[in-house]
Image (cartoon, rainbow, N blue to C red):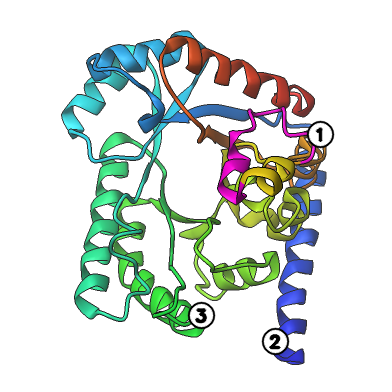
Amino acid sequence: MNRRDFLQATGLAAGALALGTSMTTAEEKAPMKLRKAVKLGMVGGDAPLVEKFQMLKDIGFEGVDVDRATDRDEVNAAQKSSGLIVHGVVDWVHWGQPLSSPDPAVREAGVEGLKTAIRDSHAYGGTTVLLVPAVVNKQVTYADAYTRSQAEIRKVLPLAKELNIRILFENVWNNFLLSPLEYARYIDEFESPLVGAYFDVGNIVRYGWPEHWIHTLGHRIGKLDIKEYSRKIANDEGVGKGFRAEIGDGEDGCDWPAVMSALKDIGFSGWATAEVRGGDRARLKEVSERMDRIFAGYGA
């Protein structure tokens, strides 16, 4: 990034901070709420979906993010019976068919997968699709990933507008969007309210501090993924092992009071979805209770 581009990106970040501040001022008397959800793939066992949804509702979750291909009628029947809300869908083909691929056929398949996820989210009454927008590797340069993915995503925006579904980009270990300034710039270049950030708090800890990113991204954050990460475990056992830390136990990872304070600063209200090791009712109840503890400082 040259000096001019850096200053432009910095200006975008300043704008985010200004908007976040104004939002807080305008809404300081309005109650802010974190709506607690879980990824569907975390729910273990072979019980019918309606029973899984009811169990999640009973142990304190308000919603679920569907992260796998699932029968639409079954999902909607489970929603209706349990009262659990499907708030969104994860695009489950974005790793295997990335929008940054050098192969046009792979990119086309990725676009079709994204369209399917948008239609599914709409059918469930959801509001978003989570998307990993690109993957950088030995065969795909950073610049190509940037331009290819934006071009492919723009093809889908008309459908997203028609069905009123936002496409939110997740920060993952894909060697892409490695700074909050660039993350903000990438979103802003679409010049569309149909795109934003699905900010994963734990994924950032490996190379940053979540509260810094939250302040920079500001109003662009549409939803949150909640997980923990321990730098000590990562240093001792390997970077991927850092996620072994349980939510709230990563003393050298997520500073949850600082994260909650940053979310308040930008006036965030909305869905916060656990993305951790799942399991049976007892395990998911523990996750629910851990989320309650870290959310307590938010007043939610």
Report x, y in % for residue 166: 43, 53
- Is 48 above or below relative to 87? above
Give the residue at x 55% y 67%: 187
Q: Amino acid at mark 2?
A: Asp
- Is 145 above or below relative to 52? below
Q: Which residues are magenta?
A: 238-252
Q: Quadrant of the N terminus?
A: bottom right
> Which sits in the foreground, 111 or 242?
242
In the image, residue 233 lies in the stretch drawn in magenta: no
Report the side of 251 relative to 166 (left or right).
right
- Of badges 3 and 1, nearer the viewer stands 3
Q: Residues within 10 Å of mark 2 (few under 14, many from 20)?
A: few
Q: Amino acid at mark 1?
A: Pro
> Which sits in the foreground, 10 or 44?
44
Q: Amino acid at mark 3?
A: Tyr
The earlier-in-sequence mark between 1 and 2 is: 2
What's the magenta bit mostly, secondary-structure-wise? loop
Give the residue at x 50% y 73%: 190
- The label on residue 257 is 1
Secondary element at image label 3: helix
Report x, y in % for residue 77: 22, 20
Q: Pointer 2: what residue?
A: 5
